[in-house]
Amino acid sequence: MLLERDTEVAQIREALSAACAGTSSLLLLTGPLGIGRTALLQRLALLSGEDVRVLRANAAPMEQDFAFGVVRQLFDSLLTGAPPEACERWLREHGDFARMILADDALPLGECRSVDLSETVLNGLRALLADVGADHPLLILVDDLQWVDAPSLRWLAHLSKRLHGMRAVLVCALRDGDPRARELTLREITDCAQRVLRPAPLSVEATREMVLDQFGEPGDEEFARACHEISAGNPLFLRSVLVTLAAAGHSPTAGHVETARRQRPAQLREWLANCMRTQPRSVRDLAAAIAVLGDQGEPELMARLAGLDPIGLAAALRTLGQLGLLAAEQEPRFLHRVVQDAVESSMTVAERERLHDAAAALLYSEGSSAELVAAQLMAVTASQHPWSIEVLRAAADTALRRGAPDIATRYLRRALLDGALSGESRGRLLIDLATAEREFDPAACERHISQAIPLLTTPRHRAAAALRMSPAIVGAVPPTVIDLFQQVADDLGPASALDGSARDVALRLEARLRHAGHEDPAALATAVERLSALGEEPPLDSAAERELTAVLFNAAMLTIRQPAAEVARLAGRVLEREPAGADGAHSHLPLVAVALVAADSVRGISSWPAAERHSPRQDVTAVDALVHAEQAMMLVARGRVARAREPAERAMRLAGAHWPEAGTLATVALTYVALELDDAELVEGVLDEAGRRRSANMALTASLQLLKASQDARHGRWTSALDTLLGCGRQLDAAGWRNPVLFRWRPWAATLQHRIGDSRAALALAEEEHARAEAWGAPVALGRALRLKGRLHDGAHGTKLLRESADVLRASANELELARSLALLARRLEGGPEAAALLREAGALAAVCGVPWLIERVEQGGGTAAPRPEAALTRTERTVVSLAGDGLTNQEIAGRLGVTSRAVEKHLTHAYRKLGISGRRQLMEILPRLDSEILR
């Protein structure tokens, strides 16, 4: 496309009209790189008309050694359309001059170079051109005048002064900023130009047209304006970006604006790199300095790096500006990132390294910031500067303070490559590297700590190095890490034999080793004994004492060997001395959060710290993921499951390499959310996401089993769901995890047992749940257990249990559990003022918690218990229906129960009649509705 070039075309047509009348002229077409000079010449060749003979030549850098190459192109363009007799006449009348240019047996190029460019030769070639154009006006187009070979350039200079009487228009295109423009012969041509045409950059409107042409559809206004801004209206830059976007399948919408800004077209880069290679040394050096220093360099620094004085700097800047490569005239900043790519690709690897090393030294001598100097060192394979390692460490420290551990890691890994450090100095550098890596690469952190420990000279330093690894909160600790902790702990000795900082290190090692056994019932038992040995008021003055205490009361919480009130008291004391914050993600504070949730003691905590307040960087780390997961757990503990969903889902997305800790905690929270909201899609999503993670620990396994059981129950697979829940319980008991709050599998299993007719087993589970709830003492656990028993018992005793459940839960922070008990009690009362009041209270709490199914139940309850059609089924009929719901055939059910197929068919027929359905298809449709209460 040729857009917004009507003015230039009109002026050339006007010159052609004058030439037809006998007035020849020379027009100079100039402009920066990519402005569209070639495209304009192509259009002129098409618009010239049949009565005009067009001679066209395109010069090229690689053809500058071919004598008369451009002259031959000009005349060769006539041969295709010229009659044979005309060519014969030209050869006959102009002899050697025509043979030199047109004949098949033209002189070899070597001989052409030796031809004396005398006035006779130049006049002879002009006479030949005049003869060619005797019958028709001539339009002579020469593109890229700066690359024309010397003999052709000499003849063009001769011709430009002798156009009179030829009825010709000579149009020469010359790129701004080219070094040859200052040569005498070329200046002779440009000085003869009657007009200078300089095409302007394209407007936004033209940009819209190019977008439409490229994509076949009009682009969004924001997209078009962004493309215009990116290219500064340069047609070549604009077309390159649009072609690259279209090839990648992007559409011209506002959503792809940032994608457009990131484009660095490879073909454009190569074209610009070739252009840079033809520039004078001073221009190339300044461009390289701009590419190396970027936006951080002042013009004076760039001049020093390029080795230019003020005059040389001004001249080189002027050339780069004329070429159209700078964002603004005399401002050392490239128009587009692809220009920097082109400059870098035009340099050798050695040249780039030398410049970056020199830039680092220059910035260091000027007192620039460590990160600016380090950015240059990062581009050098090895630096000989004695200060390079310290600069890289200082830059890493700065990056860590602003919350960019990945950037800090790059600096420190680069520092290790210098090889100047050995022994303990190298060990400390490895420790710094591991500290940065623990945010996003725990495996690398562990590896570098293991490499650093043998290099450290004292047991305390080795132990402190091991503690740089983040503690596992709910995930399993790798055996290699346990071995490492044990090794440094044995070297250091027991805390009782140490004092000061060494004692603190020993206590923290003990905490890590004890927490590593949090899935071992024997290790949990010894941890509780250790907590008892500390007395009623364990010392909490140091962070090490608080970490050990948190690990110990976490063991007491899991095993319910100490009551919830005591665990909550200790957790509160820890939190008083060390408020929750982002730094706690690498300490014991997540354990405090879990303990408070399990103890139903979150009411006094207004909010857990927001990750955004503690992480200044936009990229996220384990800190953000853990804090979001803790926020979700706190909200779940208060029954605010709808609000808990967003931070739990965000934590799962952000967990990354820290999935065993942050991801598991988020999965536990999201499991509660999915089950309480009765959201089948969310259940499936959590199962898919967690199933893709290669992480095996008790908390994650139990959560996934609960979700799987909910899926089975929803689809009527009661026995399968029950088997999953009972298996989950066996695993938790085997690990010593007896707490009834964290994984409430018994209430759901008991409900299923009651549903399939095994009331005795259901009551046994309910009594077991009640016993553990009483032992633990948390209101939410006790109220939930009482509600379960109330559901399983009919009559006044059941109602009494439900009243007790509601009374107990009024002391709980979990408003959702209270709402459920109130709603169930109201239904049991079957109407009346009290039932209506209970329903109103339950509805208000359900609305606050954001649980749609409970709100709907309360609104439809009306104070009366809804009849359950399956209640009339016998125990055997419930069992058969459950197995049918699992997809078993009559024969398979008969084999499972040890009866005949006819007996199975009889039980199903009775069940169909009681449920008001006609067969299996309707049974599969109503089972999810019948099972909607199982997990509520």
Image (cartoon, rainbow, N blue to C red):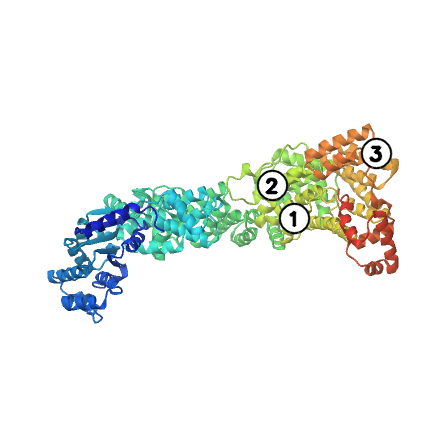
Mark carried by residue 830: 3
Closer to us: 535 or 345 = 345
Q: Is residue 248 visible?
A: yes
What residue sits right under mark 2 in the picture? 628
Q: Is residue 359 visible?
A: no
Element type at mark 2: helix
In this picture, is 810 found above or below 415? above
| Left or right: residue 263 compared with residue 644 | left
Closer to us: 766 or 416 = 766
Frontmost of labels 2 and 1 is 1
Task: Tell which circle, 3 or 1, labels the residue nearer the N-terminal end.
Answer: 1
| Left or right: residue 28 compared with residue 577 | left
- Amino acid type of disc 3? Glu
| Left or right: residue 81 compared with residue 451 | left
Q: Are marks 3 and 1 in contact (CB under 8 Å)?
A: no
Q: Position of residue 841 (x, y in %)?
A: 75, 30
Closer to us: 819 or 8 = 8
Frontmost of labels 3 and 2 is 3
- Amino acid type of disc 1? Val
Task: Tell which circle, 2 or 1, labels the residue nearer the N-terminal end.
Answer: 2
Q: Residues within 10 Å of mark 3 (few under 14, many from 20)?
A: some
Element type at mark 3: loop
